[in-house]
Amino acid sequence: MKHYLDTAEKAARAAGELLRQNFQRPLRVNSAHAHDIKLEIDVQAQELIAKLLLEEFPGHALYGEEGIVGDQSSEHQWVVDPLDGTVNYFYGIPHFCVSIALRVGSEIMVGVIYDPVREEMWSGQKGAVPKLNGQPFHVSERADLAEAVISVGLAKTGETINANLPLLQEMIHRVRKCRVLGSAALDLAYVACGRFDAYIEQGISLWDIAAGWLLVENAGGRVDLRPREDMKGKYRIVASNGVIDLKL
């Protein structure tokens, strides 16, 4: 797995550098919706990641937010979000990241999340202690909900926003603080290294959470991930340190 992990880190850093160089510069919008924006830089970042990964592993597939490439019959599939936090990026908010995971069959085996602004790289492989910039990390040990900081994602559709708002309202009264920061991958990275105690989202895509899922579990946490039957390709996720009782 080390070769896969090293290549994923290299690709994440390259895409992160592209994003950093273009941050707070004029950006080309490919499409805009009520609660989301698609930028040309998203596509460029994914193309760069795909080039680096598939040059190294030409028999692999890539499944990303900006499309699929490679041999889709391959057992090895890279799951990529080239820019998680696009709206933040577009508005000049320095909270976004690159997320890359490797799925072999049905299992996530490698995951990296890279924040190019803070130059933080979370990385891990299945069964091994994950690392942040080379240093091992672990989920928090907080068990008291009143002391917890949690993130509640609001997603992009009216349906998921309406599903999450009551949960957000309830949690605000029960925890120390709720956060809505706009990057699912970073939310999971923050749970994994103990900055957050939990992350909850009602409608999220696999590329947003694949790498973070592995990192949270490897860091001693728990992830409950369930497909939404009413929304193709979307999942409900509750990720936590594994000891806190969210009473959901």
Image (cartoon, rainbow, N blue to C red):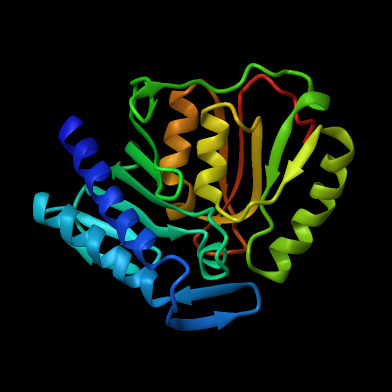
Q: Position of residue 52 (x, y in %)?
A: 17, 55
Whether residue 34 is visible here, answered yes or no, is yes
The answer to whether 121 is drawn above or below residue 89 in the figure is above
Quick check: 78 left or right of 24?
Answer: left
Position in image of residue 211 (x %, y %) = 41, 42
Q: Residue at x 44, y 79 (%)?
A: 26
Residue pictured at 40% horizontal, 64% vertical: 65
On screen, residue 248 versus residue 217, left or right, reads right
**Could you say which quadrant of the image residue 135 lies in?**
top left
**Residue 72 visible, this angle:** no
Q: Count numbered badges in the picture.
A: 0
Question: On the rendered image, what quadrant is the N terminus found in?
Answer: top left
Q: Position of residue 30 (x, y in %)?
A: 44, 83
Residue at image position (66%, 69%) is 157
Q: Nearer the viewer, residue 103 or 165?
A: 165
Image side of residue 189 versus residue 166, left or right = left
Residue 109: image quadrant is top left
Residue in the image at 64% along x and 16% along y:
141
* Above or below, 213 relative to 193: below
Question: x%, y% of residue 149?
Answer: 72, 33
Q: Is residue 162 above or below residue 174?
A: below
Residue at far right of view: 173
Residue 19 located left or right of residue 223:
left
Which of the image's four quarters has the C terminus?
A: top right
